[in-house]
Image (cartoon, rainbow, N blue to C red):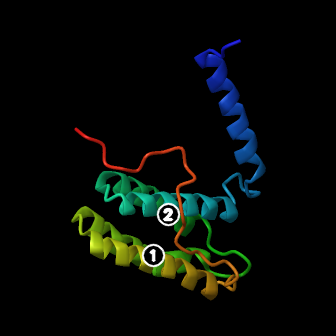
Amino acid sequence: MPLNRKHFLGSATAVIALAFGSAQSGAGEPSLAVLMERMQTYTHKLQLSVAARNAPLAGFYLHELEETAEFIIENIESYDDQPVGQLTQQMLMPAVELLEGAVDDADWPASDVRFGALLEACNACHMASAHGEIRIVPASGNPFAQDFTVQGD
């Protein structure tokens, strides 16, 4: 029996609400772990977009990464007694902005280098916040059901 669109959207919304709700902090906002997972996904998709030399898609994922980081800066002052918001502002945001400039210019050699610097900023922040066991490395392969190549006009 095929699902109609209304039924599918209602079911999908319920599943998303349950999954998202179960990972929320006590304040009704996403937990830091959920936000970090979201940033890791955006970063992986950003890597695939840069590798495909797809400036519009890389710009989209940079924007999403930046918005998530800004949410952390504005809403999560500390975690495990570490100043996560401040560290995100000081360590991650400059790396995001440098990469953004290279992607905007379609300077792919600089984008490759600055993407590496973005991952280094993530790891430096983890070290500074006493979570050095979390190491982010360049991903291998594309686990997403998504094509990252530039589409023809």
Q: Is residue 116 left or right of residue 13?
A: left
10 Å crowding of disc 2: few (<14), some (14-19), many (20+)? many
Q: Nearer the viewer, residue 46 or 68?
A: 46
Q: Is residue 71 visible?
A: no
Please state which amino acid type lies under the numbered disc 1.
Answer: Leu
Q: Secondary structure at mark 1?
A: helix
* Spatial separation of the CA atoms under disc 1 and disc 2: 9 Å
Q: Which of the 4 image quadrants contains residue 13?
A: top right
Which callout, 1 or 2, points at the residue further toward the start of the chain? Answer: 2
Which percent across, then down, holds residue 39? Answer: 55, 62
| Quarter containing the N terminus | top right
Q: In which image quadrant can residue 101 be found?
A: bottom left
Residue at 38% in and 53% down: 60
- Residue 21 is labelled as none
Mark 1 packing: few (<14 Cα in 10 Å), some, or many (20+)? many
Verify CB contact (< 8 Å) between mark 1 and mark 2.
Answer: yes
Tag 2 residue: 43
Residue 106 percent across, percent down from the top left: 24, 64
Name the residue: 28% across, 69% down. 108
Q: At 67% from the left edge and 82% from the top edge, which residue is drawn?
A: 82
**Residue type for callout 2:** Thr
- The residue identified by callout 1 is 118
Whole-percent x and y of residue 89?
48, 76
- Residue 32 image position (x, y, % from top left): 66, 65
